[in-house]
Every structure is written in C-alpha cells, then in structure tokens.
Image: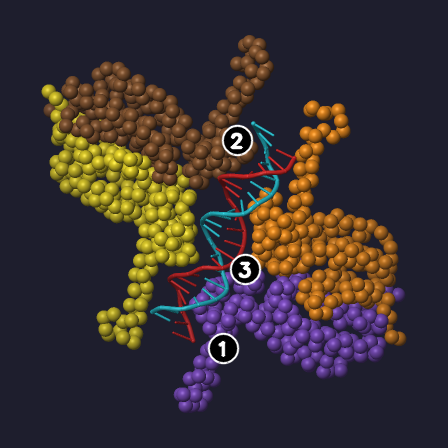
Chain colours: A yellow, B brown, C purple, D orange, E cyan, F red
Amino acid sequence: MTAAARPRPAAEQQPRRRALVAEDRRRQILDAALDVFAERGYAAARLEDVAARAGVAKGTIYLYFADKRSLFMDLVRGAAAPMIERIGELAATDAPIDQLLRGLVDKFQAEVLGTRRKEVFRLVIAEAGRFPEIAEFYHRDIVSRILPLLRDVLGRAARRGEIPVGVEQALPHLFIAPFFMSITWDGLFGSIEPLDTRALLNAHIDLLTGAGAKKP
Amino acid sequence: MTAAARPRPAAEQQPRRRALVAEDRRRQILDAALDVFAERGYAAARLEDVAARAGVAKGTIYLYFADKRSLFMDLVRGAAAPMIERIGELAATDAPIDQLLRGLVDKFQAEVLGTRRKEVFRLVIAEAGRFPEIAEFYHRDIVSRILPLLRDVLGRAARRGEIPVGVEQALPHLFIAPFFMSITWDGLFGSIEPLDTRALLNAHIDLLTGAGAKKP
Amino acid sequence: MTAAARPRPAAEQQPRRRALVAEDRRRQILDAALDVFAERGYAAARLEDVAARAGVAKGTIYLYFADKRSLFMDLVRGAAAPMIERIGELAATDAPIDQLLRGLVDKFQAEVLGTRRKEVFRLVIAEAGRFPEIAEFYHRDIVSRILPLLRDVLGRAARRGEIPVGVEQALPHLFIAPFFMSITWDGLFGSIEPLDTRALLNAHIDLLTGAGAKKP
Amino acid sequence: MTAAARPRPAAEQQPRRRALVAEDRRRQILDAALDVFAERGYAAARLEDVAARAGVAKGTIYLYFADKRSLFMDLVRGAAAPMIERIGELAATDAPIDQLLRGLVDKFQAEVLGTRRKEVFRLVIAEAGRFPEIAEFYHRDIVSRILPLLRDVLGRAARRGEIPVGVEQALPHLFIAPFFMSITWDGLFGSIEPLDTRALLNAHIDLLTGAGAKKP
DNA sequence: GATGAATGAGTGTTCATTCAT
DNA sequence: AATGAATGAACACTCATTCAT
C-alpha cells in the first residue's frame, strides 16, 4: 500500500522471504530425516536425532510435519516427484532401442543411483510393508506408468528385430530387475562387494539387444 | 512317538525327550518370530506378540535366545542353513546350461519363493543395514559361494556357445537380479500387481540362452 | 465515538485512543480465555486457542498478561469485581425479609446465572484448589462480606418473627447453598437434567420464610 | 492335581493369592491416584507421581489400567459403587421424616464427608465437564435414584403434615443443596473458614421440619 | 524349566514462553 | 505494538528385559 509504486514493496516481500525460509527449513528437516531413516529404519529412527541433524529443536519438526509418519511419507513422496515428471520423456524419442535403453540407464544413474534418492528407494523397499499408501503411490505413479512405456518401446524394438521376440510380456519386469537389485544390493553388500552398476546395466542391455554375440 | 519304540533306561530317555521338547519350543518361537518380524519389521516387532503367537510366556523366549537381536539373528541364519548345504549340488551336473538354469529356478521356487523363507530373505534385505553381521554372513556363506559357481557354469556355457560371450563378468549378478526382484516385489506390490515369478524367470533364461529368437 | 465529540490536540488524543484499543484487546483476550478455560479447564486450556478465538497472535497475549496463570487470575478477579461493588447495596434497604431475599435472588440471576460470570464461578470452584490466592480473594472480598450481611439481615428478620429462630448461626451458609448448587449442577447435569434455578431459589425462600404452610 | 485331597491345593491357591495381590496393587494405585488427582486436577496430574506414591514403577500402572483416563474413570466409578448399593436402604424405614433425614445426614457424614470419597466427589464436580460419561454415570446411578426416593419420602412427610406443603417439587433438589455445598466449600475455603457441616445439615433439617419455631 | 508381573529407560508429541522481525 | 516461528521441558505411554515364584 504505502510503497505500491516500487517493484518490491516490503509488505509483499516479507512473506515471500518467510516462505523461502520456511521451504528451506522443510528441506533441512527432510534431508536430516533421510539420513536418520536410512541409517536406522523408520521405527528405530528418533525424531530427536532428525532435529539435531537438521539443527533445529525437536518441536520445530512439528511445525512442518504433522507427525513422524507424515515426515516419512512426505520424504518418500517428495523423492518420487521429479521422477514422475520425467517419465513422459522416456519414450518420446524414436531412437534405436539400444540407444534408448542406454539413455534410460544414464538417467537412472544420474537421478537415482548417484543421488540420495537411492536411499529413499531403499527405504521404500524396506518399509513399504508397513505403509500401504506408499506402495500404492509408487505403483500408481511410477511403476504402472513406466511398465507400459517399456512395453511399448520394447514391443516396437521387437517388431523392428532389434530384440528377441517371444519374451515381450515379461520383458518390462525383466528389464527393471537389475535396477531393483542395484538399489538393494548396495544396502546389503555395498561395503563388502560393491556392485558395478553401470557394467551390470550395460551387460543387461547388451544381452537384451544381442550385442553380446553367441560364439558361432 | 519316538520314545515308544523300545524300553530305554529312564535316566537316559529323559534328557533326550527334554532335548526334543526344547528343540520344538525353539522352533515354535522361531516360527512365531518370523510371523511377527515379517509383519512389523525388526524394530517394531514386539516380543510379547512373538510369545503369544508361539504359545509361550514372554520370559520363555529368554530361555532360548539371549535377546531380541539374537532371536532375529538365529532366525535369519537358520533360514539360510538349508540353502547353504545345497549350493554344492548346483554345479555338480554338467547338463546343458538351459536345463541347469531351469533346475535352479525350480529349486528357488521350491525352497524360497514357495516357502516362508522368502519372508526371511525379504527381512534380510530390509534390515541388513542395521545388522552388518547378517550381511556379512549372507555374503560369505551364500552370495560369495553362489556367484563363482554361476560364473563357472555360465563360463562353460559361453565356451560351448550356449550363451552370448562378452558379458560373462556381469552375468552372475545379472542372473540373480530377477531373484532379488521377485523377493522384494512381493512385499511392495504383491497385493496390487502380483508378479508371475515363474514366467519372469523363464523369460530370463530364454533371453539368456537365446531361446527367444530375433526376428530375422 | 468518544473521540469524535471535540477536537483535541492530536498529541493528547493518540495515547487515549491507544489506551482504549489496548483495553479492548485485553477484553477480547479475557473473553476468549473464559471460553477456553471453561471448556477445557485451566491445565488443559491452550493459549493458542485463546489467541485464535481472540483473533490475536499467540505472542500478543504476553503483552497483556504475564503468563497463563496471570491470565487466569485476572479473568477470575475481573469477574468478581462488579459483584464486590454491589454487595454494599444488599442490606441497604429495610424491606421485609421475603422481599429482600427475592431481590437477592433476582440480582444473582441477572448478574451471575444469566451471564458468563456463572462459568467463571464454576471455574473457581473447580480450580481453586490449585490457586490458593483465588480462594483467599473470593473469600475475603465476597464470601466474608456477604455472610455477615446475611447474618445481619436474617437476624433482624428473625427478631421480627419473619423467619424461624434457633437456626440463625447456620442460616447464612444455608441460604447460599442453593446458589452454590445451581452453579455446579449446571456443569454436571445441565445437559441431562437442567435445574430450574428460579423455582429452586423461590422454594428456598418460601421454606425459609414459612410461606409454605404446614398442613394443620 | 497332586494334592487334590487337602483343602487348599497349591495349584489352586497360587492364583488365588495372585488375585489378591493384584487387587491390592490396584487399590494402592487407585489410592495414590486419588491423592494426586485431588491435589492437581486431572490434566495436571502426573502418572509418575501416582506411581511414586503407590510405590510402583510407572509402567506398572499400565498393567492395571489402560491409560490415564481409564485410571480416572475407574477411580471415580469405584468410589460411587458403595453408595449405589445403599441407596435402596434409604427409604426402607418409615420413621418420622425428621429421624429419617437425620439418618441420611449421618450416613453422608460417615460415608462421604468423613472419607476420601469426599475428594472423589469434589473431583467429579470439577472435572465432569470433560468427562461426559462420568456425569451421565453419576446422574443415572446416583442422582436419578436418590431424587425420586427423596421426593417420595418428603411427599409422605408433607401429607403427614411433618413438613410444609407447596414446595414439594423443588424439595429434593433443595434438600441436597447443602450436601453439594459441603463438598465444594471444603475445597474452596476449607483452609480459611472450615464449614461445620453437621451444624449446617442439622439446621437444614430443623428448617425443613419446622423444628426451628417462628417467634410468635 | 516356565511364568508373567514388575521395571524404567526411551520416545513421540504438546504447549507455555521467548524473541527476531 | 504485534506477530508467529522456534524452543525445549514435560509427560503419556511402550516394551525389552529381569526375577521371584
């Protein structure tokens, strides 16, 4: 009101900065929560530790999340969001299957395995039994959108003779199996025998596209 | 039953029966524990529930297991034992690769997926982060014994031209990925979209052995 | 309104309006506090609710009251103030006892039972144990001033033959008992079996003044 | 089994003794709870204090009561039980009203005012607002059974000319008002100006039965 | 051996109070 | 003056573990 003429009146800027700070806090807490949940599992995670790691007081968490469960759910949903947006791009190109799948692998490396999101997915796999909504959510918004895309892409490739026929029905699930494993392996045996995910996935694609030739 | 066959000196028979009863109790408790751990996860599982389901008193558990952690570890180690014994048989035969792998799949179906052991493995995957000994144990006694065997078998097959060459290094891991997934998938999406494990694994072998032909 | 009458020097008018606004705020908060305290009791009342109901921020309460306890004490003292002022009028008249007592009843109806002050008194009865100052205050400024007045009035009436003799000592307490009950009853059984306070008090006076005749 | 011949076989006695001990513990806890609830009110009472005063650990309370609320409810219901049983006796006799009422007063003195039950009733009056079940319970099982009895007794007395007519409808409520007051007064002003309950109640009966004569 | 009552450390959650803006 | 985000002490309730019987 008083200073409506200038570009950013104080009265308007205040809440904007507030909102930013609030969003930052939220992030801080979510980041800390991921650390703690990943390290101890949902049930054994202590909100006090989350608070400490986030550099806030215990009560502050409750200003941003209704309770422990909500914190966990928001963490898990939030990690999926960027994935979901990009799923559409997957099948957009009409490149040769081999190139397309390798693109997928790269994207998975860049967006999941190379990030903390990997730990979220590990958490989901470990805890989904106790959080049916999460399983539903991941199925509805990720799995059930990726699988048809893969079916489509792989079907086209089969018709073009780029991959074997006769196994199409199982292929999408088959294709994502190594992704699943690369997520769980790490939590299990990562410190004993790390998995060379890239090599694994490349071999997978080689196998699928017949790049690995049978000895004549 | 066992004791009814022949008259034995009571002094000798008593402890034997005792031992059997004790072993039964142990089993009861372990069975109950699997139920409860599988349903709620390690941290959230209540020993009171285990006791109730086993039909014993809470204190009784402590006569057979040192504490909650030990109960869990024994459960998880015990489930692996039968596996371990059979691993040797795997590479014994020198059948064609395709037959051999299908045999493996059948065994896995029969001994894991079709049994409650599946749930133990799921538990291991979910909780291993908090139980380094378990991860070590499973790696040492199972994974690190299966992988070389597979490497061996698959190597032989590659040399015989039964499977593609050039991906051998990654093959063992690649081969087990669908097994991993079939274990985790069920806990996640089993109630939403059950996985046809047998079809998946068969397709996997088809793909591996080139049974699925490329369109010429 | 008040400030509109005559032009005053701004410097003088400002603080006056401020004071009025401040007094309004205070009232708003006290009103809201009564709602919340009455509904949940002192300990379970949340200042956040008080603030919300008063339409102010939580912190604002602390500009007007030192802490929760003070807010409660001020509320409770404030409600007594108008009572205290009028106590003197009680014995002023020298009307017949019957008329005088009925006047009292009317006043009590009008000033307590018919107002939110009733709830304050209920609160006092419920919480006085934890607030000795309040009990002292109510005793010193109300009870110990009303009882002698009643003793005086009833004594005069007894000497005039308007009420029975021989029970004078207990009469003042006896006289106020139904007032006590009408306050507490409502909170207890008000929603189940509302009390016809006026009828009760009238019967009480009838009984006291012998208006109800014994069957000869 | 082993000693079925003798009057109290151990196997039977054990649970019996257990039950007694358990009942004792319950009592201990309820007694302690009354202390603490009476002193601080429901919301501010700390179960830790109850436990300490009962000489048990915090967790022990939960072996006997589901939660804080249940503890309170059981306390409050339990205190009413003996009352309820005796209500029937009240109107049994057909003694002169004056004698009957004095009997009531004595009973009330002996069973409520002279006992810790008085504090339970005080609690009920203070907290009933937050525990509708309690108010209902007290109304249904005590108030709504006492009032008709009183109506009956007082009606008979009125017909016999022992008490004034014309106020019968209000009389039962009027009769119990001093009882209400004696309970609440004590918590309020007990330490400042203790109420001579017996004198009050006697005067009340005198007034009611016309024992106090009007000055002619 | 078996029991289950008792323990008390541990944790999620609330809320009066403070203080930077 | 007014705000409301932040704090952290406090408390109800849980559950692994112990131990007298």
The chain to which mark 3 is attached is C
Q: Amino acid at mark 2?
A: Leu
**Residue indicated by mark 1:** C23
Vertical arrangement, residue A121 with respect to residue F4, above or below? above
Amino acid type at image mark 3:
Ala
Residue C79 vertical placement versus C38 (above, below): below
Mark nearer the N terminus (1 vs 3): 1
Where is residue B40 shown, x and y percent of the image? 43, 38
Q: Position of residue B108 (x, y in %)?
A: 33, 23
Residue A120 occupies quadrant: top left
The image shows residue A24, relative to residue A43, as above or below, that is: below
- Which subunit holds the residue at mark 2? B
Question: What is the spatial separation of the Cα atoms under label 1 and label 3, in whole angstroms?
Answer: 27 Å
Q: Which residue is found at the position 36% from the left and 25% from the top?
A: B112
Q: Determine which residue is flagged by label 2.
A: B63
Residue C109: percent from the left, percent from the top?
Answer: 65, 71
Residue at image location 39% in from the left, 29% down from the top? B77
Q: Nearer the viewer, residue C181 or C100?
A: C181
Element type at marker 1? Answer: helix
Within 10 Å of the Cα at label 2, are there few (<14), some (14-19), or many (20+) other Cα atoms? Answer: few
Q: Is residue B49 visible?
A: yes
- Residue at 89%, 75% (x, y): give it: D216
Question: Which residue appears farthest toward the top when viewing the image?
Answer: B6
Label 1: few (<14), some or many (≥20) within 10 Å?
few
As helix, strand or loop, the secondary structure at mark 3 comes to loop
Task: Tell me the number on the disc at residue C44.
Answer: 3
